[in-house]
Image (cartoon, grey):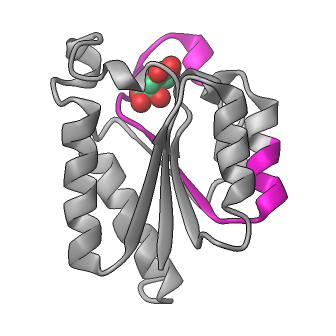
Amino acid sequence: LKILVLNGPNLNMLGHREPQTYGTLTLDELMTRVDEHAQQLGVTLSHLQSNSEAELISTIHDAWQKIDAIIINPAAFTHTSVALRDALLSVNIPFYEVHISNVYAREPFRHKSFFSDVAEGVICGLGAIGYQAALTAAVSKLHNKNN
Ligand code: DQA
């Protein structure tokens, strides 16, 4: 199984950025944990963090017919990007939406997502564990277990 992990804008600043909200792990540390988890599950992970909507969209297009599931933290694009939503729909790859923070405990503009209604599942507020939980769920669904 091949799974793509996408992280949107400002997530390269994890560890330094608003640590009371996003924790103190850097993106590298967080993705290393996800990689280790993927190894245990026997799946191949690829990653991209980008601050560019265009680069995220092109990477989703490139995943067409190559990738079995996508785990995406669209970050601020969650609340703004119809284009990223349409890109995910265009490739017809099941995806899991992850947020490190509990967006529902924050500003009202974070309560609206352009992704949640078309996501396979949505995780928020679990910190770094959210990515691992999404990976567990994606692999289990692809193996047709527990669902
Ligand atoms: C986020 C929540 C978004 O509202 C915010 O813009 C982010 C990160 C999260 O992981 O909690 O950049 O997606």
Residue shown at 73% from the left, 65% from the top: 64
State the residue in front, 124 or 85.
85
- Position of 100 compared to 145: left or right? left
Asked whether, in this view, residue 142 is left or right of residue 28, the answer is right
Find residue 135 and report its image quarter: bottom left
Residue under the image location 58 percent in, 24 percent down: 111
Q: Is residue 104 left or right of residue 133?
A: right
Q: Nearer the viewer, residue 5 or 133?
A: 5
Q: Quick check: 142 above or below 61?
A: below
| Res 76 quadrant in image | top right
Residue under the image location 63 percent in, 24 percent down: 52
Q: Which is more toward the observer, 28 or 128? A: 28
Residue 77 sits above or below residue 43 on the image: above
Answer with the quarter of the image where residue 23 lies: top left
Residue drawn 15% across the image and 23% down it:
24
Q: Which residues are magenta?
A: 86-111
x, y percentage for residue 104? Answer: 47, 25
Does residue 112 appear in the picture of this structure?
no
Q: Is-magenta flag for residue 102?
A: yes
